[in-house]
Structure formats: structure tokens, C-alpha cells
Amino acid sequence: MVDFPDPLDDEFPLGDGVVDLEVEVVCPHCAERCVIGLDPGSGSTQDYVEDCQVCCQPWRVHVTYGLEGRAEVWVEVE
């Protein structure tokens, strides 16, 4: 069996650590709390648009993963 290097090892050098996969945020439009899924495979710094699950208005989502795999996430009006 061939063991290929995992590209995530470069971004998360601690290896088998725990990575945040979801987070609760507050919609900047309707102020409702929503849980959104995170994709650590998309890089340590991410910026994308997602719609609120309650009011359907778009937000800009900012995600930054630290070396330990913990995500800092904030949303703002798109």
C-alpha cells in the first residue's frame, strides 16, 4: 500500500487533531442563530457567500483556521 502525503498536513501540521466542522453564527439581517457547515479542506482562510437558512438573505462568511484546527468565523451583510 502506498501512503500519499495529505495536503492538509501543510495547513494543519498537528496531524490527527480535531478540526471545527460546523459553527453557530447570527444572521446579520434577521438576527436568528444558524448552524453552518465548514470545509477545512478549502484552506486555512476562506471567504464566501452563503444564504441565511431563515430569511434567505445573503451573508459574506469569513473563516480562518488556526494551527490547532479551531475556526474563527464571522458573517456580515453581503
Image: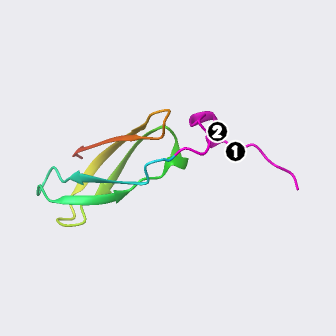
Q: Which residues are magenta?
A: 1-17
Q: Residues within 10 Å of mark 2 (few under 14, many from 20)?
A: few
Who's the residue at 34% across and 51% down the image?
49
Q: CA distance from mark 1 to mark 2?
A: 6 Å
Residue type at mark 2? Asp
In the image: residue 6, left or right of residue 32 = right
Residue type at mark 1? Asp
* Residue 33: x %, y % from top left: 19, 58
* Residue 8: x %, y % from top left: 62, 42
Q: Is the residue under label 2 in contact with that under label 1 (CB below 8 Å)?
A: yes
Who's the residue at 62% across and 41% down the image?
15
Q: Residues within 10 Å of mark 1 (few under 14, many from 20)?
A: few
Specify the principal SS of the magenta part: loop
In the image: residue 52, left or right of residue 7 = left
* Residue 13: x %, y % from top left: 60, 34
Who's the residue at 32% across and 46% down the image?
61
Q: Which mark is residue 76?
A: none
Would residue 8 be counted in the magenta stretch?
yes
The one nearer the camera, 25 or 17, is 17
* Residue 10: x %, y % from top left: 63, 34
- Secondary structure beneath dot 2 equals helix
Q: Which mark is residue 9?
A: 2
- Secondary structure beneath dot 1 equals loop
Who's the residue at 64% across and 39% down the image?
9
In the image: residue 77, left or right of residue 37 = left
**Residue under pointer 1:** 6
Please say which color scheme the image uses. rainbow
The one nearer the camera, 62 or 37, is 37
Would residue 71 be counted in the magenta stretch?
no
10 up-or-down from 60: above or below: above
